[in-house]
Amino acid sequence: MKHRKPTLDRRKVVADILRNRGDALVVAGLGAPCWDVAAASDHPLNFYLWGGMGGAAMIGLGLALAQPGRRVLVLTGDGELLMGLGSLATIGVQQPRNLAVIVVDNEHYGETGMQLTHTRLGVDLAGIAKASGFRAAGTVCGGAQLRTWLPRLYRQPGPVFAAIKVTTRPAPLVLPLREGPALKNRFREALLGGKARL
Amino acid sequence: MKTTAWPDTIHRVLTENRVRQVGYVPDSGHARLIELVRGDRGMRAVPLTTEEEGVALAVGAWLGGERSALLMQSSGAGNCINMLGMANECRVPLLALVTMRGQWGEFNPWQVPMSRATIPSLEAIGVVVRPVDRAAEIGETVAAAAQLAFNTCRMVAVLISQRIVGAKAFK
């Protein structure tokens, strides 16, 4: 299969996705997706992963099962998702209607020296998601395609999966809050109010 | 394998502690409990492909206001270590119920190394470990572990001895 060079800008893609987020809950995977989500705009209902590589989609599942009335968006990287590929099968089994897993796919390990990931070497994440039972799964390559996917990410019955191909063009670091308990407490208080506290 | 009452006791304790999501990687020792969880409309059974998924599931569940438990055998403890680091840093409660292999009357030598490493590796990443050697003590131990986990936001693992579970028969 011939490789198609990505053209979309990751910051613009993530900003477009989050512009009309409503009351959605957002999990940002380790590395650049955290900086992208923080750059789009910080929000108490953003949970940024500074570790736990491979866990973003499963955190999204636990959250989606606990909050069936809220849309849950996982925004993560291709390397991060590849480390937890089995979670696509686990999510496929659970069929959460309110979960969308979005891979901001630059086909490289951006935090460690830009080594190629499997997605640059022929692995089709959307194909794996589809075969795992996601109700909608696709690879997004251009702006027009992204515009058709934006409403699906929020409204199509899940689980929904999109791998959005983006360039490796560097973007300025925008570092969000990084203290685990502070992130957790901020998120829970915004979502659960007084019940969040011990 | 003969069915004993301790899995039913654990199921009752999980219900009393309002555990809603139960992630698991099967173990013959947990077979009965998994069956009870799957048959319970108040609980969501989440079969996992690997144990670390269950740690991340627990983080998501807690962020969303639900309590969870993670069922696995001791060989799975090693698969969880880095993900447990996240639960530790974020002070997310984790209740893990671990059936031991490679310990009491084991036949399979390959089970022994991870069995021997289970307690030191879980403790090294910050999990409070409570081994149980007698079936009669399982209920109170799981209840105490659940209280410690959910009341103080700590990771707690109850290790259920192979003496209770019984060694796997290779015949």
Image (cartoon, rainbow, N blue to C red):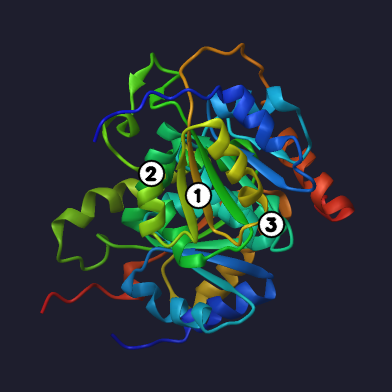
Disc 2: host chain: A
Q: Position of residue A117 (x, y in %)?
A: 33, 28
* Residue ID for mark 2: A125
Give the class, few, some or many, for how many residues have Cα within 10 Å of label 2's Cα (few <14, many ≥20).
Answer: many
Q: Position of residue B148 (x, y in %)?
A: 66, 56
* Residue ID for mark 1: A161
Q: Nearer the viewer, residue A28 or A6?
A: A6
Q: Is residue A54 visible?
A: yes
Looking at the image, is A99 positioned above or below residue B85? below
Query: Extreme front residue here?
Result: A144
For the residues labelled 2 and 3, the Cα–Cα distance comes to 36 Å
* Residue ID for mark 3: B150
Q: Nearer the viewer, residue B149 or A101?
A: A101
Q: Name the amino acid, label 1.
A: Phe
Determine the secondary structure under disc 1.
strand
Give the class, few, some or many, for how many residues have Cα within 10 Å of label 1's Cα (few <14, many ≥20).
Answer: many
Quarter of the image for the C terminus of chain B: give it.
bottom left
Q: Is residue A198 visible?
A: no
Q: Nearer the viewer, residue A38 or A139?
A: A139
Determine the secondary structure under disc 3.
helix
